[in-house]
Amino acid sequence: MTTRERFVMRLKKLRAERGMTQEALAEKAGISRSYIARLELGRQDPTLGTLEKLAKALKVPVAKLLE
């Protein structure tokens, strides 16, 4: 499994565990919902800044998104 595939699975799982929609996560992280969708489809790689925003919104360390 690639790093991208692990990230996609982890992002979806963490978002679902928190009962958040893509829209809710996007709003909380300060990024667009379409960008969240592209990340979850594995069509785009996140920047370090985006990883930090997602981790903060999901209340996890950045490393948790990449496990």
Image (tube, rainbow, N blue to C red):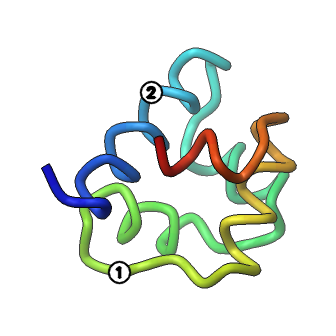
What percent of the width, then of the height, locates residue 37?
Answer: 40, 62
Q: Circle 2 — which element?
A: helix
What percent of the width, then of the height, locates residue 4?
Answer: 29, 63
Q: In the displayed structure, does residue 38 sit left or right of residue 42?
A: right
The kind of residue on which mark 1 rests is: Gln
Q: Circle 1 — which element?
A: loop
**Residue shown at the point (57%, 64%) measured from the top left:** 33
Q: Which of marks 1 and 2 precedes in the sequence? A: 2
Q: In the displayed structure, does residue 62 sit left or right of residue 40?
A: right
Q: Residues within 10 Å of mark 2 (few under 14, many from 20)?
A: few
Q: Is residue 24 above or below residue 17?
A: below
**Residue shown at the point (67%, 19%) measured from the top left:** 18
**Residue shown at the point (51%, 63%) measured from the top left:** 36
Residue at the extreme left: 1
What percent of the width, then of the height, locates residue 25?
Answer: 69, 47
**Residue shown at the point (57%, 15%) measured from the top left:** 17
Q: CA distance from mark 2 to mark 1?
A: 18 Å
Q: Nearer the viewer, residue 35 or 13?
A: 13
Q: In the displayed structure, does residue 1 sit left or right of residue 45?
A: left
Q: Nearer the viewer, residue 54 or 30?
A: 54
What percent of the width, then of the height, locates residue 42?
Answer: 26, 66
Q: Is residue 65 above or below residue 45?
A: above
Which residue corresponds to mark 1?
A: 44
Tag 2–tag 1 contact (CB < 8 Å) = no
The kind of residue on which mark 2 rests is: Lys
Q: Which numbered marker is on residue 36?
A: none
Q: Residues within 10 Å of mark 1 (few under 14, many from 20)?
A: few
Which residue corresponds to mark 2?
A: 13
Quarter of the view holding residue 12: top left
